[in-house]
Amino acid sequence: MDRAQGGNHIGDASVIGADSRLFPNVVIYNESQIGQRVRIHAGSVIGSDGFGYVPDGGVHRKIPQVGQVIIQDDVEIGASVAIDRGALGPTVIGKGTKIDNLVQIGHNVTIGENSVVVAQVGIAGSTKIGKNVTMAGQVGIAGHLKIGNGVVIAAKSGVMHDIPDNDQWLGIPAQPNRQAKRQMIAIQQLPELIRRVRELEHQLNKSQK
């Protein structure tokens, strides 16, 4: 590791590669693996427990989180990012991926190489994200999904389905770009359509009298 600053904590059996840099108050939990030339900005937490519980008689019993986090080479992680350790296997951040501030990455998520994750994105557990994916600000992705290579997801989208390679999706719930835009245009036309229907109804009523 090239340089660490005040308030850092590095847990037992963690490995940090050459030329990596931790800014103040970064926490690295036990058994995390950080590659070379990685930058982790202030207040980020790597390897905290995933959010895993099972209902039992009206209470929530914790599922032990015994996996780890693997961050590959040349990744940059913004401030106040939380990356959970896997429940069993690892959570993996691919080589060259860039993560903005205030991002939550759940347990057993995999993000492919050279992806971009913009501020306030939340990714639920066990979702697999391909290479060269762009997730704009405040995207939310449900768990156990597969997001293909080269996908672009527009800001504030809520993803509830798998997305094939090279698609562009947007909306709540997120849909293919062209379909979502058609629906948005249709919604904008609704007030005028309602006015015209009422006018036609009025004319029809007059003609029947």
Image (cartoon, rainbow, N blue to C red):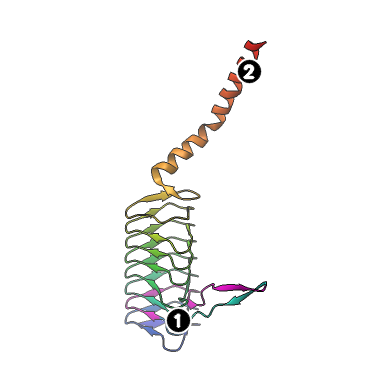
- Identify which residue is drawn at 44% across, 80% down: 67
Give the quarter of the figure containing the C terminus: top right
- Residue 5 circle label: 1
Q: Earlier in the sequence, mark 2 or mark 1?
A: 1
- Identify which residue is drawn at 57% across, 24% down: 197
Mark 2 Cα-neighbour bin, 10 Å: few <14, some 14–19, many ≥20: few
- Label 1 sits on what residue type? Gln
Q: Position of residue 157 (x, y in %)?
A: 47, 52
- Label 2 sits on what residue type? His
Q: Is residue 49 magenta?
A: yes
- Residue 106 circle label: none
Residue under circle 2? 202
Q: Quadrant of residue 34?
A: bottom left
Q: State if disc 1 and disc 2 touch (CB < 8 Å).
A: no
Give the quarter of the figure containing the N terminus: bottom left
Q: Position of residue 73 (x, y in %)?
A: 32, 74
Q: Is residue 93 magenta?
A: no
Mark 1 Cα-neighbour bin, 10 Å: few <14, some 14–19, many ≥20: few
Span of residues in magenta:
33-57
Residue 146, compared with residue 187, is above or below; it is: below
Q: What's the CA distance linking mark 2 and mark 1?
A: 74 Å
SS at circle 1: loop
Q: Position of residue 190 (x, y in %)?
A: 54, 32
SS at circle 2: helix
